[in-house]
Amino acid sequence: MTPEIAKKIGVKRALQYATVGILIAFFFMTLLAGGNLRWMTEWNYWINIVIGIGVFYGLAYWSGRNAGYEILIKKKDDSKVGIKYGILTLIITAFLVGWTGFVQEGIEPYDRFWDSFEDYVFKPFFWIIVIGTIPAILVGIQFGKWIKKSK
C-alpha cells in the first residue's frame, strides 16, 4: 500500500460518508420543519445550504486524504481517526456556514455587530454542534472502519 493509494481510498470513503452526513442533516431539518420538505425555499436557506455542501465536501476531501494515510499507512486506530475527522469536519463546516447568513443579513446599519454575530454565527454553530455531534461520532467510527476494510 502506497501513501497515494491510501489517500485515494480515504477520499473516496470520505465523500461517500459526507453524502450520508448531508442526508442526516436534511432529515433533521425536515423534522424541525414539521415534515415540510419545502423548508429550504420557505426559510430562504438555499444559499447557506449550497455553501455548506461545498464546504462539507471540500473538508471531506481533505479529511479523507489524511484519514486514509493515518489509518492505512501509519496504522492508527480507525475509530479514533474517524471520530477526529468527523468532529473536525462538523466544527469547521458549522463555523464557516454561519458566516454566510452574517454577510447576507447581519451587516445592517441598524444592527450591532455582536447581536448579528450571535444570531448568524454563534447560534447556528451551537445548534449544529449540539445536534450533529452524535451523528458525527457514529458516522466517523463507521468511516474509519470502512477505510480500514478497504485495504
Image (cartoon, grey):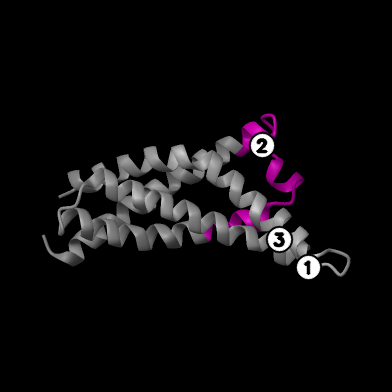
Query: Which residue lies most toward the bottom here?
Result: 109
SS for callout 2: loop
Marks 1/2 in contact by CB < 8 Å: the verdict is no
Side of 102 relative to 58 (left or right): right
Closer to the N terminus: mark 3 or mark 2? 2
Between marks 3 and 2 in the image, the one whose residue lies nearer the viewer:
3
Q: Amino acid at mark 3?
A: Phe
Marks 3/2 in contact by CB < 8 Å: the verdict is no
Q: Residue at x 69, y 34 (%)?
A: 33
Q: Amino acid at mark 1?
A: Ile
Residue 40 among those drawn in magenta: yes
SS for callout 3: helix
Between marks 1 and 3 in the image, the one whose residue lies nearer the viewer:
3
User: Residue 107: which disc?
Assistant: 1
- Percent across and percent down for residue 129 are 53, 46
Side of 73 relative to 94 (left or right): left
Closer to the N terminus: mark 1 or mark 3? 1
Query: Which residue lies most toward the front here?
Result: 114
Instruction: State whether residue 128 is above or below residue 134.
Output: below
SS for callout 1: loop
Q: Which residue is mark 2?
A: 37
Q: Which residues are magenta?
A: 29-54
Separation of residues labelled 1 and 2 (CA atoms): 29 Å
Give 85 or 5, whichever is nearer the viewer: 85
Circle 2 Cα neighbour tier, 10 Å, few/some/many (<14 / 14–19 / ≥20): some
Q: Residue at x 36, y 53 (%)?
A: 85
